Image: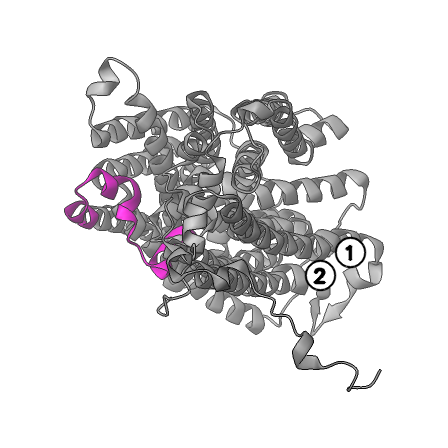
């Protein structure tokens, strides 16, 4: 096929959305806030999305706790070396259970809050795109 | 040891508590002030208050006593009490605040629209609260007896009287200030003597604790029962914290959901810092006070240490400081508990015709506060003393088996129904409650005793499975406004949706 066979400009078809061609009067854009406040199907989807995202974050924290603190008893039970080992003169089990775990818990909480707040900022930006202050 | 310092310490803490309470009285005027401090408390103040309220006698005295007796095995308790706040943070904190309810029964009513579930939740709040108050009062009697030689009933009566006065006088606003003050008092009271104790220990050439290897290792007796107990304690404390009445009510005093989350992270920092200390007291106790092991005075090891390690007036002053901290622990936890149970009971009382309906909100709260304290006081005077740290585990197990399913499923699952919630509260409450009663009354031995003594590992699954199963079977009872509820619980206040 050569460029000469297809006169591009002649065959081009304009594809438009029905809205773009409509008169300005009927172009009322429904806001996300309206969709949610009026409990439409679309609004429902927005709410389900944020609930699921927050639940995923919560479950990720739970899973982390189960796989770390939750496995510690088994780890100590199975490994006598670990249970008896020393770290700077302190038995390693005491160092982990008496100190390390608390540092981990605070870090996990901090990371979670940052994530949860970011999810909420995204949601606010979606609901109120004009509101720059939030 | 001279008892004068101890008397002075107890008197000062009591006066400070009442004094701050009276200051709160000046600024607390409306019913909203009384119940939730008008929801205007900053994250830092609120977090200190939560820490002050949460760190009970079990934390201040009980943890060190358990470490003294059992060693590394019991480090899971403070870990569980802290992790409980992390799970509360991720599953409950912000949505619960956004629900706008005062208490768990209020939440149940809002979410499910069922007065029956609300009533069941109210009764459970009172049950959990009493289980938690009982060891606080018993511990107060023990401490006052140890430090001053006064009869045990005097300590019980003193703490009960101050708590009631405080709640009756000031309500939540004054409680918030008192609690925040008491967190820092408790931390100081443990931290300062520890410096002197560790210095003396270093001067002695750092002797190691005299104990078998079992005491040093996380599993002294690595058998199936030991493992079961560890995991059951984990389940009870991880999931029970969110259901304790005095913990949950604190979240309504945050201005919004975001503040509720930030508050909880600060709480994690405060609790983590605090829990480093009792373990060290337990270890030092094993070195200097091994004779307390196996006696009912193991819980007093924190108070006994200064006199064992140091000499002269210095030891007396440090003991007095520790006594002050211990009393702060009794007062703060019992005040918070009494406030929250009285809040719930007060709202129920006002629904009872004909007398209750005539009571104002504040009057109902005051009447309830007295009633709430009387029962555990009588129990504390007649019941056999049990180690504080183990007895609070029953309160955690009961809360984890009932309120944890109600809150977590109510917040995250649209399918929860009123019959499902009711069945779950009954199933979890009856199993965990029966295990508690049987253990305290009959204390069975062997596997049965272990299973009943630490019921959470089986009663919490029963609570969840029953709630989910009955909810699925009664799908047509799903509240019609569940979508609106989800919008209110999970969307940020800034989004200004109709809630």
Give how far across and how far down residue A62 sits, in percent. Answer: 64, 52
Q: Nearer the viewer, residue B143 or B58?
A: B58
Q: Contact (CB < 8 A) between labels 2 and 1?
A: yes
**Mark sitting earlier along the chain (2/1):** 1
Q: In the image, is residue B14 above or below residue A109?
A: above
Give how far across and how far down residue A55 sits, in percent. Answer: 59, 50
Q: CA distance from mark 2 to mark 1?
A: 8 Å
| Residue at x 23% of width, y 51% of height | B20
Residue B43 covered by magenta stretch? yes
| Residue at x 54% of width, y 63% of height | A115
Q: Main secondary structure of the magenta part?
A: helix
Residue B487 covered by magenta stretch? no
| Residue at x 34% of width, y 58% of height | B45
Mark 2 belongs to chain: A
Give how far across and how far down residue A84 sits, in percent. Answer: 78, 62
First to last magenta residue range = B23-51
Mark 2 Cα within 10 Å, few/some/many (few <14, many 20+)? many
To which residue does mark 2 refer?
A93
**Which of the labelled discs sits on residue A76, or is there none?**
1
What SS does tag 1 mark?
helix
Mark 1 belongs to chain: A
Q: Nearer the viewer, residue B252 or B222?
A: B252
Q: Say whether residue B212 is visible.
A: no
* Label 2 and label 1 in one chain: yes
Quadrant containing the C terminus of chain B is: top left
Give how far across and how far down residue B192 sits, in percent. Answer: 42, 65
């Amino acid at each position: 096929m050569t460029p000469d066979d297809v006169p591009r400009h002649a065959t081009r078809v304009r594809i438009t959305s029905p809205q773009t061609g409509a008169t300005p009067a009927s172009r009322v854009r429904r806001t996300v806030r309206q969709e949610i406040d009026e409990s439409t199907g679309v609004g429902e989807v927005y709410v389900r999305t944020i609930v699921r995202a927050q639940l995923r974050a919560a479950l990720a924290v739970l899973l982390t706790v189960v796989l770390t603190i939750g496995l510690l008893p088994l780890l100590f039970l199975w490994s006598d070396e670990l249970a008896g080992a020393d770290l700077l003169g302190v038995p390693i089990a005491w160092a982990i259970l008496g100190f390390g775990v608390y540092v981990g818990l605070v870090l996990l909480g901090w990371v979670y809050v940052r994530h949860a707040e970011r999810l909420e900022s995204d949601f606010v930006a979606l609901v109120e795109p004009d509101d720059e202050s939030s | 040891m001279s008892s004068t310092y101890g008397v002075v310490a107890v008197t000062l803490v009591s006066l400070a508590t009442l004094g701050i309470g009276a200051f709160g009285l000046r600024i607390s005027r409306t019913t909203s002030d009384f119940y939730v401090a008008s929801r205007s408390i900053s994250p830092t103040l609120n977090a200190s208050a939560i820490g002050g309220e949460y760190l009970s006698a079990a934390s201040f005295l009980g943890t060190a006593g358990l470490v003294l007796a059992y060693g590394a095995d019991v480090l899971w308790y403070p870990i569980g009490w802290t992790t409980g706040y992390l799970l509360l943070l991720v599953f409950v904190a912000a949505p619960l605040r956004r629900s706008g309810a005062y208490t768990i029964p209020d939440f149940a009513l809002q979410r499910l629209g069922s007065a029956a579930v609300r009533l069941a939740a109210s009764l459970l709040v009172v049950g959990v609260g009493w289980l938690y108050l009982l060891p606080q009062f018993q511990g107060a009697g023990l401490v006052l007896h140890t430090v001053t030689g006064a009869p045990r009933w005097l300590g019980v009566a003193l703490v009960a009287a101050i708590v009631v006065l405080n709640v009756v006088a000031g309500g939540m606003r004054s409680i918030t200030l008192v609690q925040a003050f008491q967190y820092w008092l408790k931390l100081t009271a443990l931290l300062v003597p520890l410096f002197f104790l560790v210095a003396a220990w270093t001067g002695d050439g750092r002797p190691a604790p005299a104990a078998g290897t079992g005491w040093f290792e996380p599993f002294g007796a690595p058998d199936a029962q030991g493992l079961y107990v560890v995991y059951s304690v984990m389940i009870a404390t991880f999931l029970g914290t969110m259901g304790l009445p005095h913990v949950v009510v604190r979240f309504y005093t945050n201005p919004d959901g975001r503040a509720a989350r930030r508050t909880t992270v600060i709480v994690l920092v405060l609790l983590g810092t605090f829990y480093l200390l009792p373990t060290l007291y337990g270890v030092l106790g094993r070195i200097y006070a091994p004779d307390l092991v196996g006696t009912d005075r193991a819980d007093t090891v924190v108070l006994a240490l200064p006199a064992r390690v140091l000499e002269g007036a210095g030891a007396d002053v440090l003991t007095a400081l520790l006594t002050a901290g211990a009393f702060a622990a009794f007062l703060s936890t019992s005040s918070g508990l009494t406030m929250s149970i009285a809040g719930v009971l007060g709202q129920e009382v006002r629904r009872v015709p004909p007398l209750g309906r005539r009571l104002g909100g504040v009057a109902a709260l005051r009447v309830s506060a007295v009633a709430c304290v009387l029962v555990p006081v009588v129990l504390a005077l007649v019941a056999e003393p049990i180690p504080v740290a183990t007895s609070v585990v029953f309160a955690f197990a009961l809360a984890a088996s009932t309120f944890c399913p109600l809150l977590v499923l109510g917040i995250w699952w649209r399918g929860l129904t009123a019959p499902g919630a009711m069945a779950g509260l009954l199933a979890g409450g009856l199993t965990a409650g029966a295990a508690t009663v049987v253990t305290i009354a009959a204390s069975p031995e062997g596997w049965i005793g272990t299973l009943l003594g630490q019921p959470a590992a089986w009663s919490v699954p029963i609570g969840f499975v029953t709630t989910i199963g009955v909810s699925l079977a009664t799908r047509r009872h799903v509240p019609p406004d569940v979508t609106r509820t989800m919008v209110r619980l999970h969307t940020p206040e800034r989004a200004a949706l109709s809630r």
